[in-house]
C-alpha cells in the first residue's frame, strides 16, 4: 500500500521552460527513495506534482496504480503526510497543532496528541511535564520543536505515504540528529520520498536519485553513489 510511480513525467510552470524533462522512478510500498541535486533542479516540483498542486504536462503519476490526475486533490493529499522544511504553526496549543486538519477530533484524539507530543520529544523540553505544554497557547517554539510538532502530526494522521522535504535543513547539527532519528522512526515501513540537500541525511534510503536540470542523471544506494563520486 502506498506505491508511488512517476512515468516519464514532464512539467513546466510556463510553456516556455520545461522544468522536469521526463522523470521516471518508483517507490515500492514501505520503501524509501531520496532525491538529491542542486538548488533549482526540480526536486520540490516533484513533491508539488505528487500533491497535485499542479498537473503533469506529460507522462503520469500513479499511487497504487491509480493515476492521480483522475482523483481529487483532497483524496491524493489524504494519503500523504508531509514534514516540510519549515513548519508553520497556528497560534494555538501544541495539541491543536498536532491535530491540524482534524476538526472532528474527539477526546481520544486529544489524548493521543498528548502522547505523541511525548514521543516526539517534548517531555524532555519541559521539566514540569508535557501536558501543561501541549495545552498552552501562543508558544514560542524553536525550529526543532516545530519539526517535532510536524512529526507528531504525521504520526497521528498515519498516512501510507510520507514526504520529507528537506525536513532537517533549517536546523543546527545537534537538533538535526535528534529530529532525524524521530523521522527514521516515522518513516519505518512507510513509503517515503525524501527531498534532501545532503547525502549524509539519507544514508538509510533504499534508493537515491540524483536530479540535475530536471533529469535523473544517476541512481543507486548511498554506498554506490559514494563509490562513483
Ligand atoms: P529544487 O527544489 O530542486 O531547488 P524547484 O523544484 O523548487 O527546485 O524549482 C525548479 C525550477 O522551477 C527553478 O528554476 C525554479 O525557479 C522554478 N520554479 C519553482 N517554482 C516556480 C513557480 N511557481 N513558477 C515558476 N517557476 C518556478
Ligand atoms: P487532511 O488530509 O488531514 O485533512 P490536509 O488535506 O489539510 O490534511 O493536508 C494534507 C497534507 O498536505 C498534510 O500532511 C499537510 O501537511 C500537507 N499540506 C497542506 N497544505 C500544504 C502546502 N501548502 N504545502 C505543503 N504541504 C501541504
Image (cartoon, rainbow, N blue to C red):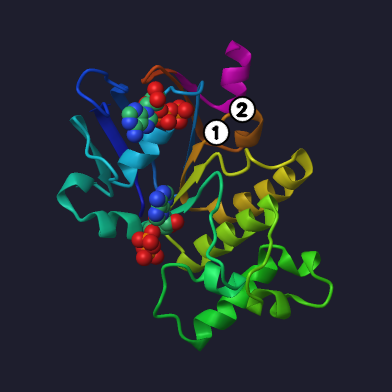
Quadrant of the frame with the N terminus = bottom left
| Residue at the image point whose x is 51% and y is 20% from the top | 38
Q: Which residue position is annotated with label 2?
A: 199
Question: Where does the image place residue 172, in percent across and percent down from the top left?
Answer: 74, 40
Q: Is residue 188 in sight in this rendering? A: no
- Examine the rendered structure and indicate whether residue 1 appears above or below residue 214: below
Question: Where does the image place residue 217, in percent across and percent down from the top left?
Answer: 42, 15
Q: Which residue position is annotated with label 1?
A: 196
Quadrant of the frame with the C terminus = top right
Residue nearest the observer in this picture, 45 or 156? 45
Question: Where does the image place residue 78, in percent across and percent down from the top left?
Answer: 34, 60
Task: Please report the bounds of the magenta region as a residue range.
Answer: 218-229
- Ligand 1 sits in which quadrant? top left
The verdict on label 1 being within 8 Å of ligand 1 is no
Q: Nearer the viewer, mark 1 or mark 2?
A: 1
Q: Residue furthest left?
A: 70
- Examine the rendered structure and indicate whether residue 14 appears above or below residue 171: above
How many other residues sit within 10 Å of disc 2, few (<14), some (14-19) or many (≥20)?
A: some
Q: Is residue 138 in sight in this rendering? A: yes
Quadrant of the image occupied by residue 112: bottom right
Residue 186 placement, left or right of 27: right
Magenta run includes residue 219 = yes
- Examine the rendered structure and indicate whether residue 227 appears above or below residue 99: above
Question: Where does the image place residue 53, in percent across and percent down from the top left?
Answer: 29, 45
Task: Tell me the distance, in whole angstroms, between the alpha carbons under discs 1 and 2.
Answer: 7 Å
Residues under numbered marks 1 and 2 in contact, where contact means CB atoms less than 8 Å apart? yes
How many other residues sit within 10 Å of disc 1, few (<14), some (14-19) or many (≥20)?
A: many
Amino acid at each position: 500500500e502506498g506505491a508511488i510511480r512517476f512515468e516519464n513525467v514532464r512539467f513546466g510552470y510556463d510553456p516556455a521552460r520545461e522544468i522536469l524533462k521526463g522523470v521516471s522512478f518508483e517507490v515500492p510500498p514501505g520503501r524509501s527513495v531520496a532525491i538529491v541535486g542542486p538548488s533549482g533542479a526540480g526536486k520540490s516540483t516533484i513533491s508539488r506534482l505528487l500533491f497535485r498542486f499542479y498537473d503533469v504536462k506529460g507522462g503520469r503519476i500513479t499511487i497504487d496504480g491509480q493515476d492521480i490526475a483522475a482523483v481529487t486533490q483532497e483524496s491524493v493529499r489524504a494519503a500523504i503526510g508531509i514534514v516540510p522544511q519549515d513548519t508553520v504553526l497556528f497560534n494555538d496549543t501544541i495539541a491543536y497543532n498536532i491535530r491540524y486538519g482534524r476538526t472532528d477530533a474527539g477526546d481520544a484524539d486529544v489524548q493521543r496528541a498528548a502522547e505523541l507530543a511525548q514521543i516526539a520529544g517534548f517531555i524532555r523540553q519541559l521539566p514540569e511535564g508535557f501536558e501543561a505544554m501541549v495545552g498552552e497557547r501562543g508558544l514560542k517554539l524553536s525550529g526543532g520543536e516545530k519539526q517535532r510538532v510536524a512529526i507528531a502530526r504525521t504520526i497521528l494522521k498515519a498516512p501510507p505515504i510520507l514526504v520529507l522535504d528537506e525536513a532537517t535543513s533549517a536546523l543546527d547539527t545537534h537538533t538535526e540528529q535528534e529530529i532525524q532519528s524521530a523521522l527514521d522512526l516515522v518513516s519505518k515501513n512507510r513509503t517515503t520520498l525524501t527531498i534532501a540537500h545532503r547525502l549524509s541525511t539519507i544514508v538509510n534510503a533504499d534508493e537515491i536519485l540524483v536530479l540535475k536540470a530536471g533529469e535523473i542523471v544517476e541512481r543507486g544506494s548511498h554506498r554506490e553513489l559514494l563509490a562513483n563520486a
